[in-house]
Amino acid sequence: MFGNFIWRLLAEALPATSANPRLNAVFWIYLFFATSALAIYQNHVKCFGTGDCQITAAYQGGGFNDEYHRWLIECSDGEAMIGIFDTYKSFLGIAQVWCYFIFPLKPPAIGIYPFYPVCNVRNFTQYEYYCYDKRFPTDTVDTFTTAIFSPTSADPVQPTLMKCCKTPAPYKLDYNRCQWKYTHDKTGEHYDGFWVVKCDTNFVMTGIGSAMNPWDSQLHFVWIQCCPVLTVSTPPAAQQLYAKPQISYTS
């Protein structure tokens, strides 16, 4: 009885799209939830026509954390992470990340993951703050940050892992001109301005560092490392039309 009353109430309150009142109500309920889901995604990832995308990391904890699957907080095809942002918790975590489309000569992945074929995972809890590891130079040279992972959802998230991927041909990194962008000033006070901790033009993130704050005895993210991208040569394939997408998983 009460259910029928609710259906009649919805049918009278919502604009008519069908002769059937119940079908009309179902349509508008579906449209409401679909619009809400789209709004949540748009609030999570905000992209601009300049090749820049800002990803909100808040409450994006969990999910995959290996090099073979896409993470919740990860840049898209041809993009690299270039900045981190936190407004009100002094970089106890990361509220947003900035991705930038910086590899225009890379053949597109046509939406199929992985976007970069060679990646590895760095563990902050084991003090692996840099993408490059001198113990494994072949695997980690010319690698840059594409994603961060947090085991728990919070605002901001406190990432424990970082995904690093190799630059696609014909790009390399110039380690002689790397820079560090700090999240605090010389007195140790963390920045609260918008996107202060961001790499310069044509630089990509290659590391994220944290340290114990002597005043509050908590772990804060204190710097990012940025290294410039070099174009070594232009391969002939980059001047040709890209291949059509494959129609099966194995071909």
Image (cartoon, rainbow, N blue to C red):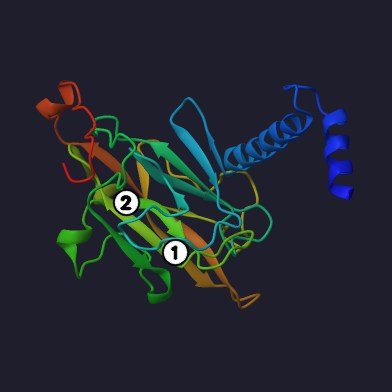
Residue 27 at x, y percent in the picture: 69, 32
Residue 81 at x, y percent in the picture: 41, 46
Distance Cα–Cα, label 1 vs label 2: 14 Å
Which three-letter amino acid code belongs to the residue tagged 1?
Gly
Nearer-the-camera pick, 22 or 174: 22
Residue, disc 2: 144
Residue 142 at x, y percent in the picture: 23, 51
Q: Residues within 10 Å of mark 2 (few under 14, many from 20)?
A: many
Residue at 78% x, 22% y: name it: 16
Residue, disc 1: 209
Q: Residues within 10 Å of mark 1 (few under 14, many from 20)?
A: some
Nearer-the-camera pick, 28 or 120: 28
Residue 92, placed above or below residue 95? below
Tell me if 88 is positioned left or right of 159 in this view: right
Q: Can residue 179 be seen in this view?
A: no
Which three-letter amino acid code belongs to the residue tagged 2?
Phe
Residue 240, placed above or below residue 248? above
Quarter assignment of residue 134: bottom left
Q: In which quarter of the image is the C terminus?
A: top left
Residue 10 at x, y percent in the picture: 84, 35
Tell me if 1 is positioned left or right of 175 in this view: right
